[in-house]
Amino acid sequence: MSQLKGNAVVGQSGGPTAAINASLAGVIRGVLANPDAIPALYGMKNGIEGFLAGDFVSLLPLFSDETKLRHLEQTPAAALGSCRKKLPDPAKDRAFFDGLIEKFREMDIRYFFYVGGNDSMDTVAKLSAYLETVDYEMRVVGIPKTIDNDLADTDHTPGFGSAAKYVAVTLSEIVRDCAVYRVPAVTVVEIMGRDARWLTASAALPGAISGEGVDLIYLPERPFTFEQFTEDLREAFKRHPNLVVAISEGIRSPEGRYIGESAQSGAADAFGHKYLAGAGKVLEQFVKETFGCKVRSFELSLPQRCAAHLASETDLCEASLLGSSGVKAAVEGKSGVMAALERVSDEPYKCSVVLRPVGKIANAIRKVPDEYINAAGNGITPAGIAYLTPLIRGERAVEYKNGLPIHVII
C-alpha cells in the first residue's frame, strides 16, 4: 500500500485519568517517528467539540524532546481538555459529517486519533463508517482510556491501573487508621462505578497483598439487599470491631434500582448516563439505624482519577505504547480500529498490542466476570486478584519543582 501523507489530529474525550496524557505522549512519539507520513500534529482542545469550533493547537513544536513528553506523562487529567459530545448518526445527518470532512480537507488532515472510553469509541466508529461512503482517504484510530475498565475487546484500559492503585493504597491507609480504636464502628467508602465496577474490585488488593484489608466489597454486578448487608456486618463484627466496607456508587437492588437513587439529582450527560453518588450516605444511615454504632461514609471522588503522583508505572507505559501503536497502525494502512491489549500471562505479567474493530467496541460494556466475585457477593476471588495485581505495579519517579510535581499546561 502506498503511504498516505497528511497531517494528523488528536483529541481526548470523556472522563480524564492519570494516564490519559501518557496516551497523548504516545501519539506524539508515534508521529515524531513517522515524519514522512505525518508532517504536523494538531491537538483538538476539548475534543471533537473544540475542533468543530476551530480550537486546536500545533503539538510538535511544544513537545520536541523526551523531557517534555515525560512531564506530560506525569500530568493528571486531559491536557487538551475533554468533552462529552455525542455525534449524530451518519446515516441520518450527512450534513454534519460533510461539514466535518470539509474542515479536515482544509487542514489536510489524513489521520484522526481519539483517546477515550466507550462514548469516545462511538465517535471513532461513526466517523469511520461515514468515511467509507465518501471520496476522502483518512485513517481513524481509537486509543482506549477509562478508569472504569469496561471497554470490550481489550484486557484492560489505560487509566484503570493507576486509579486501582490509588484505591488500593488509600483503602490500605484507611484500614490502618480505623483499626486504632476498639469501639465498634463502620466506615463506608464509596468508589466510582456505574455498571461494570472493576475499580471497586481493586479494594480487595490490600487484603490480598498485605493480609489486612477491607471487610466487605459490593459491586453492581451482583444485586444488593439490605438483609444480606445486615447479615454480612454481623458476621464481620464477630472478627473485629472496626469494619471498612467498599461499595460501588452503582450498586443496585434486585429490582435494578440504584441504592443511592433517592439522593440523585436525575441529571444526565449527553450520552444519557445519570450522574451517580449518594449510595454511601444511604448505607451510613441504614447502619446507624440498624446497629446504633459509630458510622461514617465518604466518596473517594475525583482523586481516584487524577492522583498522578501515585500512578502505576505499568499503566503509564501501556498507555504510551497504545498511543504510539495506534499511530503505527494508521501509517501502515489501518482504520476503524482501536489499539487494544491482549494478556499473554499473569506471572510473569505480559500483554501484547492488538487491533480490534471499533464498531464492535463502541457502546458495549465489559462487566466484572462472575468468577471474579465470591459466592456471597461481598468479595473478590483469587482469580480476580490475579487479574488485578499486575496492573498496579511499579512507580514512576515524579519530577518536582519547589515541592510540587511538574505539570504541563497546554
Image (cartoon, rainbow, N blue to C red):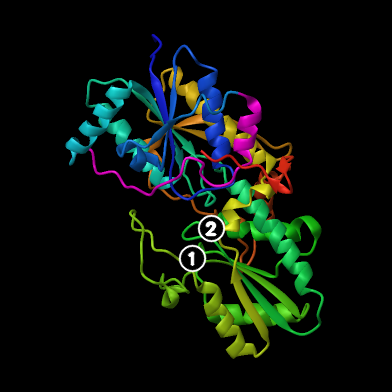
Q: Quadrant of residue 200?
A: bottom right
Q: Residue at x 54, y 61 (%)?
A: 192
Q: Which residue lies most toward the top here? A: 2
Q: Residues within 10 Å of mark 1 (few under 14, many from 20)?
A: many
Q: Which residue lies most toward the front here? A: 402
Side (left or right) of 146 relative to 348? left
On residue 47, the disc is none
Q: Residue at x 44, y 71 (%)?
A: 258
Q: Residues within 10 Å of mark 2 (few under 14, many from 20)?
A: many
User: Would residue 158 be seen by someone viewing this image from the given angle?
Assistant: yes
Side (left or right) of 345 relative to 136? right
Q: Is residue 349 above or below residue 381?
A: above
Observer-nearest residue: 278 or 376?
278
Observer-nearest residue: 351 or 46?
46
Residue range in magenta is 65-91
> SS at mark 2?
loop
Identify residue for label 1: 250
Of the 4 image quadrants, the one containing the N terminus is: top left
Q: Earlier in the sequence, mark 2 or mark 1?
A: 2
On residue 197, the disc is 2
Observer-nearest residue: 112 or 332?
112
